[in-house]
Amino acid sequence: MKKTLKIILFSCIVGTLLATTFFLSIKEKANAKNKPVLYAFQVGVFKNKDNANNFKNRYETAKVFFDDEYYRVFIGITCENKEILEAFFNEKNYSYYIKELDVTEEIEMQIKKYDEFYRQTKEENKSLVIKNLLESLPNEL
C-alpha cells in the first residue's frame, strides 16, 4: 500500500511540474504574439553607415535605420498593408526581404495612421506616402 501511494505521489508531482512548464511556455508565446508587429521591407544591411547611405540612393523611398549593430535600408514599413506594399514593390521589380520587428505602441499608432493612406492613395502617390512615413520615424526602431 505504501509503495503504491509513493508511486501515485511521485506521478502527481512529475505531472504538476510538466503541466506548469508547458503552461508557462504557452503563456510566453501568447504574450509575444500580442506585441505589435511591424513589417519592414529591407533591401540592404551594412556595417558601414556611408555604404548604407550610398545604397539607399538607388531607391526613391529608402531610409537607413540603425539597430545596435547594423545599418538597415528599408524601402517601406507597414503594420496592416503588407500585401499592398508587396504588390507595389514587386511592380517596381525591387528585391527585398520582409523583416518582422517588434515595435512600441507609439510607433505602431504612427504607422497605422499611414496604413490608412496606403489603402486610399492612388498608385502614383504611394511613393510619397511611403517616403513621408519613413521620414517621420526615428532612425532607431
Image: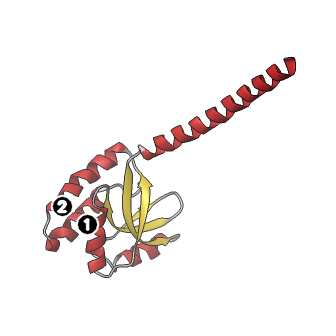
- Find out whether the residues at labels 2 and 1 contact each other: C-beta distance under 8 Å: yes
In-image side of 6 versus 68 (left or right): right
Residue 99 in sight in this render: yes
Q: Which residue is mark 1?
A: 84
Measured from the top left, where is residue 22 in percent x and y? 61, 38
Instruction: Identify whether 29 is placed above or below 128.
Output: above
Measured from the top left, where is residue 114 in percent x and y? 22, 56
Quadrant of the image containing the C terminus: bottom left
Q: Which residue is mark 2?
A: 119
Residue 61 in sight in this render: no
Residue at left offset 44%, top offset 46%: 33
The secondary element bearing badge 2 is classed as: helix
Quadrant of the image containing the N terminus: top right
Measured from the top left, where is residue 63 in percent x and y? 35, 67
92, 56: nearer the viewer: 92
Distance between mark 2 and mark 1 Cα atoms: 8 Å
The secondary element bearing badge 1 is classed as: helix
Residue at left offset 53%, top offset 70%: 47
In-image side of 78 versus 141 (left or right): left
Instruction: Identify whether 118 is placed above or below 57.
Output: above
Q: Amino acid at mark 1?
A: Ile
Circle 2 residues within 10 Å: few <14, some 14–19, many ≥20: some
Image quarter of residue 128: bottom left
